Image (cartoon, rainbow, N blue to C red):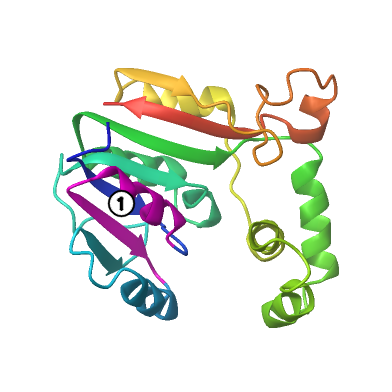
């Protein structure tokens, strides 16, 4: 499915999805992120692969891209970290997607204790620099686990209910499908279907969807 496609990874971070996708023979991947140091690292990492274009920019503004431009758009746990209007950003990502194209999006769902606990942790450790966290834990736990901790401790979240998100989709997309996720990594009602306390713990959980335009 990826072969020959043009892909936008909006808020690509360290580029792990870009790295995997380029093994599936896409025609072009645009890796978009806003950190200057990160952009330099990504350009060095993907130097020599002319299918990968590393672009400095923000997921809050995709005006550099034309309408109906990409076959695939990825927004994995990114736009809910901004202070911009979520629906406006969602619509902008849909705008650059071709008819028949697919967007994968993950947003934080509304409700539950988990985000309240992380909010408490942020308040409790609000004067601890990010560098201290990385130096303290960087060599002791999995890099992916560290990323998750840092992501929650240093990033605020906008929350969206499942019903609200699906109502955004209906005017734009012809089909939407929930992506269940993976046990041990993702927080969805499908992964935790045998947990009677899922909703008190996590509310809606993660909203993970494939949306076909």
Q: Residue 199, percent across and down?
A: 77, 26
Query: In percent of the image, x 30 and y 51: which residue is there?
Result: 22
| In the rendered image, the vertical position of residue 196 relative to residue 185, given as above or below | above
Horizontal side of residue 74 vs 81, given as left or right: left
Which image quadrant is residue 100 in?
top left
Horizontal side of residue 156 vs 70, given as left or right: right
Q: Which residue is mark 1?
A: 22
Which image quadrant is residue 133 in?
bottom right
Query: In percent of the image, x 54 and y 40: which residue is there?
Result: 107
Quadrant (top left/top right/bottom left/bottom right) for the N terminus = top left
Magenta stretch, residue numbers: 15-34
Which image quadrant is residue 148 in?
bottom right
Q: Nearer the viewer, residue 61 or 102?
A: 102
Q: Nearer the viewer, residue 135 or 117?
A: 135
Q: Residues within 10 Å of mark 1 (few under 14, many from 20)?
A: some
Q: Residue 166, percent across and down?
A: 46, 23
Query: In percent of the image, x 66 and y 29: which residue is there?
Result: 204
Horizontal side of residue 109 vs 77, given as left or right: right
Magenta segment includes 150? no
Label 1: element kind: helix
């Amino acid at each position: 499915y990826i072969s020959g496609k043009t892909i936008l990874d909006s808020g690509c971070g360290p580029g792990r999805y870009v790295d995997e996708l380029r093994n599936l023979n896409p025609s072009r991947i645009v890796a978009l992120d806003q950190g200057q140091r990160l952009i330099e690292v990504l350009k060095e990492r993907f130097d020599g692969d002319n299918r990968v274009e590393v672009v400095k920019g923000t997921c809050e503004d995709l005006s550099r891209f034309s309408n109906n431009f990409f076959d695939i758009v990825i927004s994995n746990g990114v736009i809910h970290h901004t202070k911009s209007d979520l629906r406006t950003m969602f619509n902008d990502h849909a705008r650059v997607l071709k008819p028949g194209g697919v967007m994968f999006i993950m947003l934080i769902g509304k409700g539950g204790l988990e985000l309240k606990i992380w909010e408490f942790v942020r308040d409790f450790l609000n004067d601890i620099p990010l560098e201290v966290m990385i130096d303290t834990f960087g060599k002791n736990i999995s890099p992916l686990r560290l990323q998750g901790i840092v992501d929650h401790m240093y990033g605020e979240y906008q929350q969206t209910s499942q019903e609200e998100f699906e109502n955004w989709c209906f005017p734009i997309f012809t089909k939407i499908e929930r992506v269940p996720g993976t046990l041990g990594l993702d927080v969805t009602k499908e992964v935790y279907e045998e947990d009677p306390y899922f909703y008190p713990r996590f509310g809606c959980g993660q909203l993970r969807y494939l949306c076909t335009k």
